[in-house]
Each structure stands twice: as structure tokens, then as C-alpha cells.
Amino acid sequence: ETGVTQSPTHLIKTRGQQVTLRCSSQSGHNTVSWYQQALGQGPQFIFQYYREEENGRGNFPPRFSGLQFPNYSSELNVNALELDDSALYLCASTPTGHNYGYTFGSGTRLTVV
Amino acid sequence: KNEVEQSPQNLTAQEGEFITINCSYSVGISALHWLQQHPGGGIVSLFMLSSGKKKHGRLIATINIQEKHSSLHITASHPRDSAVYICAVLAGNQFYFGTGTSLTVIP
């Protein structure tokens, strides 16, 4: 059983729409990372948030943005959805000061049609 | 260029067989995770390693920091072990993932 909860579990959106995915981490997990896993591929790093500030970003365009809140929850927002955005989106969090004690969420499966 | 390489990509085994999945990486890491992903499902972290060896039930994971290599072993494999196993290394503030090993255990 994971201490990181993602919602929704599945989502279907139309090309051009905007989507918000949510991740609720364990208390004390001030660092959260988001990953995109396209079908048949390994996850790719989108960005990381630490204490509500972006703390690193992968090779994703600005229409991928995030927010982190004081209650250890976070959001991934994707604007102007494209068909290639269809993927499993994962979040992983860790307590402050730990660089390895990550817990992964079960993911949100996004389908863009 | 892949920072993390896994082998084999696909593996089919008979129930009860001993299974080994290998992972090699090229970056300096602070930790390595072995992850399990069932079809359509999310990811579960099986092990987090920074040195040595860990055992949990029928699963054993080892890491050799000097050789930048890790192995995941499954003893007495069972059909419920069928899943994709992913090696993920933590370098800096991000993970680098292997493309996974798809394991099918046949009854």
C-alpha cells in the first residue's frame, strides 16, 4: 500500500483541452517529482517541486506546469493537450532532506482523443 | 544514449524457476530502485538500494556501486510475479529509468 495517492486514476480528454492531475503525498514529504510514461517506454522526468518551488525540469514544454501546496499535495497541469500526451503520469515524493526515500503513486492514465 | 540499461527486455519462465534481471547504469547515483508495474497499473517500489543486498520474501536485490550494476532475483517464481520490472536510478534530483523487463511466468 502506497502513501502517495493520485487522482483521477483514469481520464479521457479531447485534443486542445486542459487537464489537472493531482498527487497527495505523505505528511512531511516536501519533495515531489512528476514523470510521464508513454506506452511501452520507461518514465521520463517532467519536473520536481521542493517546498512549493520548481526544483528541476526535464525536457517538457512550458504547457506542462505544476503546483505544490503546503498540505503535501501537488498538481500537474497540461494545457493545449496533444495526442502524444496520452500516457501514464506518475508522481513520487520523499521527505525533506532525503534524496532516496521515494514513494511512488499508482499513476493517472490520461488518454487524449 | 540511455543512462540505464536493463536485460533481458522480455523473459518467459516456468513456474518455480529462478529468475535474474540485470541493470547497468552510467551515471553517479545516490540510490537505485527496483520497481514493479502490472499491466495497466501503477508502479510499486520493491527495493531501494544504495549498497549491498536486500531480501524480501522471494525477492533479492543486489548492487555493486563500483561496477555500476544491480540485479533483481526472484526465487521459486510464480505466475503472480508476471509484470514489468523497472530499474530506476536516482542521480541528483531526478530518476533515470530503464525501459523495463517484461516477465511472464507460466504455470
Image (tube, coloured by chain):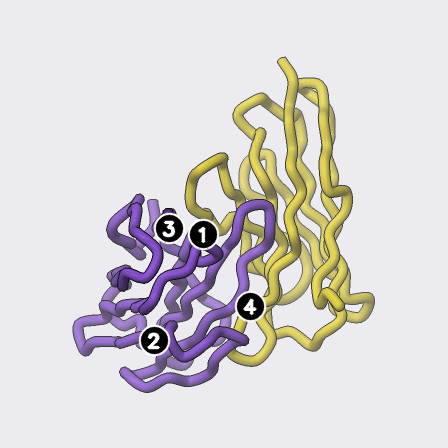
For label 1, the residue is A87
For label 4, the residue is B95
**In which quadrant of the rendered image does the C terminus of chain B lie?**
top right
Q: Position of residue B69 (x, y in %)?
A: 76, 60
Tell me the kind of residue under disc 4. Phe
Q: Residues within 10 Å of mark 2 (few under 14, many from 20)?
A: some
Identify the colour of chain B in the image: yellow
Q: Which chain letter matches label 1?
A: A
Outermost residue toward the top in this view? B107
Q: Residues within 10 Å of mark 4 (few under 14, many from 20)?
A: many
Quadrant assignment, res B77: top right
Tell me the kind of residue under disc 3. Val
**In which quadrant of the rendered image does the N terminus of chain B lie?**
bottom right
Q: Which chain letter matches label 3?
A: A
The label nearer to you, 3 versus 2, is: 3
Tell me the kind of residue under disc 1. Ala
- Secondary structure, mark 3, is strand
For label 3, the residue is A112
Tell me the kind of residue under disc 2. Ser
Q: Nearer the viewer, residue B29 or A43?
A: A43
CA distance for labels 3 and 2: 18 Å
CA distance for labels 3 and 1: 9 Å
- Secondary structure, mark 1, is strand
